[in-house]
Image: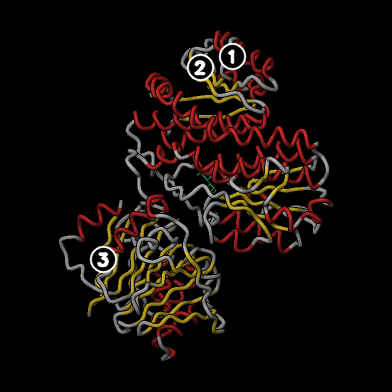
Amino acid sequence: MCGIVAYYGPNQAYDFLIKGLQRLEYRGYDSAGVALLNGDLRVYKNAGKVSELEAIADNQNVTGTRGIGHTRWATHGEPNSINAHPHLSQSGDIALIHNGIIENYDTLKKVLISRGHEFKSDTDTEVLTHLIEEIKEEEQVDLLEAVRLALNEVIGAYAIVILSKNDPNTLIAARKGSPLVVGISENEGEFFLASDATPIVEYTKKVTYLDDNEIVSIHDGEMTLKTIDNVIKSPFIQELEISLDALEKGGYEHFMLKEIFEQPKSIYDSMRGRFDPVNLTFAMRSLVEYSGKIRNLDRIIIIACGTSWHAGLVGEYLIEEFGRIPVEVEYASEFRYRNPIITEDDLVIAISQSGETADTLAALEMAKEKGATIYGICNVVGSSIPRITHAGAYTHAGPEIGVASTKAFTAQVTVLTLLALGIADIRGKISKKRLREMFAELDTIPHKVELLLESCNEKCKEIAAIYQDAPNCLYLGRGYNFPVALEGALKLKEISYIHAEGYPAAEMKHGPIALIDEEMPVIVIAPKRNYYEKLLSNVQEVKARKGKIIAIVTEGDEKVKEIADHYIEIPDTEDCLTPILATIPLQLLSYYIAVNRGCNVDQPRNLAKSVTVE
Ligand code: F6R
């Protein structure tokens, strides 16, 4: 949450900052601001999006070869221009941008106020600028040392970048709990900093990801790295693998639509090279390295939030079906605060698209401290979760920029399928015949997704036009498709603001059935697999109460189609793979409903893609 960018070099900073903020807008879009250093320190900031900031700043003096920029997801203080970053110190000589939360800001603020400091905003961030300046003056130290000493007084999470009018050849940045990447240009003395690599990749592929408690100082064109305990470190420099095309809309109206249509490729990429359907072997390093552990496991705990939690539920069904190990799926935010029982024999799997979700990260750290083996299924390479786990598998879905998660979910489910099969193989719970069947079917999935996207897109548009004004919507599924019902409902509510609930179809009788009348669209995920007959009865129950039924059915289905008001066909596949297919029309339905309602599908209100606060 909140995106930060910074530039230090021989060229003008402004264009990089604005472009970078646009790339990071998925992290928050309550306000945006930049500070530029060119003799004096100028700050331009505004409530609203980066485009609104541009409209103001473009007519001003935006020169400067040092600059910092911020796009905000408000935590402390309402989203107005005063609370927008950058924030200035008491004298106005130091400017700072921040992603995270300073938990002890109130205590620090009171002390600073008692010493005569005056604050302009309601933010926790402003406190840090005053603190750094006060330490610099009181202790007579340079900027780097002042930042280091200040950070030793701070409790909380931060990625920060600091510019000082009195130190024009210095830029300082630090990280604890919130991500920060430094891009190192081919041009001597040129550096790009950002919350993730997407603003940087256009300029350089050479990057270093800061670790927690590290401070980077760029001074006179040279970069140095140290910890907040004053230990000098050498940066680990790596090559980025992101392509620039992946960051553009590529002719689509929205990133979300592009990402939905990318799924044949993203699903393929998430399984590519990871199994050999001829020799029936796995090429997942984590499975090989941890085979001893997996053989002796008693329990797996999956932790995640939101859509990734829904993938985790599918993972539970998969691992229990194939691997025959008990699996618990936990909301990371609940798990970490309820003193859960974790032992050294547990495998704790975190699922996260961003790899930065604060609750998931903290829950995982807790599990690691208690001795569990921790495993990450993440999409963003180099993000925080993969960096703390013992093992893991990237989903390789490519950058997901639309705030609503789409291709990340199907890639997560694909990786979980492979993991479940791998665990089953290691534990001797799956026959070679069944493994062959599963590999063969998995191989067909990218193509089936491609066909499905072609066949269901127009139908989803038509159905969306009929139900776009519905105030409520119910999603029902059973077995593997119960999590899909939850995911379908989440997708609809987050981008169209229609109230939607997902339920296991049989639970309907225990309460939600009271909601059903002729106004209520009920989306039933009813592939012709396990529970088909049971689902048919649930569909009848909805029909009897005059609910409007939109059914996701297997190609060639006759029975559900006959009862439903509308149907969308998906290709036939293994029961455990139906979530990958059934999710796709639900994504499209939500997308078209939201577009018809005039909603901003890529940046829904109040949301941010990377939830780096608790
Ligand atoms: C919904 C959505 C969120 C995320 C959740 C976890 O479309 O995107 O619910 O799934 O915030 O994020 P990650 O997967 O990055 O940990």
Q: CA distance from mark 3 to mark 1?
A: 58 Å
At numbered mark 2, what does the secondary structure look like: helix, strand or loop? strand
Amino acid type, label 3? Tyr
Q: Quadrant of residue 229?
A: bottom right
Residue at left 50%, top 14%? 548
Q: Which residue is mark 3?
A: 14
Which class describes the residues within 10 Å of circle 1: few (<14), some (14-19), or many (20+)? Answer: some
State yes or no: discs 3 and 1 in contact (Cβ < 8 Å).
Answer: no
Whole-percent x and y of residue 300?
A: 75, 48
Residue at left 54%, top 19%? 551
State yes or no: discs 2 and 1 in contact (Cβ < 8 Å).
Answer: yes
Q: Nearer the viewer, mark 3 or mark 1?
A: 1
Q: In the current view of this chain or complex, which residue is farthest to the left?
A: 59
Amino acid type, label 1? Asp
Whole-percent x and y of residue 601?
A: 38, 39
At numbered mark 1, what does the secondary structure look like: helix, strand or loop? loop
Q: CA distance from mark 2 to mark 1?
A: 10 Å
* Closer to us: 274 or 535: 274
Q: Can residue 538 be spotted in the picture?
A: yes
Image position of 515 with respect to 118: above or below: above
Residue at left 39%, top 24%? 461
Q: CA distance from mark 3 to mark 2?
A: 51 Å
Mark 2 CB near ligand 1 (8 Å cut):
no
Q: Which residue is mark 1?
A: 557
Query: Which disc is residue 567 wearing?
Result: 2
Q: Quadrant of residue 462?
A: top left
- Rendered-image quadrant of the C terminus: bottom right
Left or right? Give the position of 401 relative to 286.
left
State yes or no: discs 3 and 2 in contact (Cβ < 8 Å).
Answer: no
Which class describes the residues within 10 Å of circle 3: few (<14), some (14-19), or many (20+)? Answer: many
